[in-house]
Image (cartoon, rainbow, N blue to C red):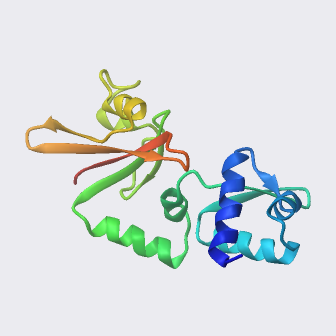
Amino acid sequence: MTKRHIQTNILQLLQQHGHGLATPEIYTKVGRERHTVTKYLERLHAEGLIQYREIGKTRLWSIVPSPLLAVLQKEEMVSQNIKELFNTMNQKVTIVSKDKTILWSNQATAEKKCFERYGNASICKGCPAEKIIKTGKSTTLQVSLGKRVQIAPLKDHVGNTFAFIETSQK
């Protein structure tokens, strides 16, 4: 069994068990030694593809909904380089959850919800993000004279939209 095959097996197994699996369950189902599976779990974790939470002495492994978001929320060098790239663009980039909570932005923001950026106390009337969440398709809109906002879905490992990326000129 090749390295890629073992990694693929682990990822498929975790996709099938959305709630997560403990390390012993994974190596039993994959049919490999504990040390071998642990090595691959750590490698996939370092790549930002899987995550774990500790329950006592046990690690419960699961798929990361968005590797991009996982990287942006870290403080490692790769993350810093990606953030620097976003900051050098003449674009405001914001990642927003389905409930309109701002998860990440390349600009400091005091707002906790995307609609607060537009001076609203609740979801904007005709919110384009609602359509994106339902259809899973990107859109571009003109919000003011010469200012465009592009919105694209962020999808999880099974293709469900769980958030969206909003870009606009600074």
Residue 10, given in percent of the width and then of the height, sits at 71, 62
Placement of 118 over or under 31, stated as above or below: above
Coordinates of residue 85 in the picture (x, y in percent): 33, 71
Residue 39 vertical position relative to residue 73 in the rendered view, above or below: below
Location of the N terminus (image quadrant): bottom right
Q: Nearer the viewer, residue 150 or 92?
A: 150
Q: Nearer the viewer, residue 1 or 23?
A: 1
Residue 116 pos. (x, y %): 38, 34
Residue closest to the far left: 145
Q: How many marks?
A: 0
Residue at image coords 83%, 71%: 32
Displayed quadrant of residue 51: bottom right
Image side of residue 10 versus residue 99, left or right: right
For image coordinates 37% across by 59% down, the residue present is 106
Q: Nearer the viewer, residue 86 or 121?
A: 86
Image-quadrant location for residue 39: bottom right
Residue at image coords 13%, 36%: 144
Name, please, the residue furthest toward the right: 57
Residue at the (41%, 24%) spot, across then down? 122
Q: Is residue 109 above or below residue 73?
A: above
Vertical position of residue 55 compared to residue 85: above or below: above
Q: Whole-percent x and y of residue 61?
A: 75, 57
Q: Could one spot residue 49 in this view of the protein?
A: yes
Q: Which is more toward the observer, 43 or 101?
A: 43
Task: Answer whether residue 45 is visible to the viewer in this image.
Answer: no
Q: Quadrant of the rendered structure where residue 84 is?
A: bottom left
**Residue that extends furthest to the top in the rendered view of this protein:** 125
Q: In screen coordinates, is 160 left or right of 29?
A: left
- Please identify the quadrant where the C terminus is shown: bottom left
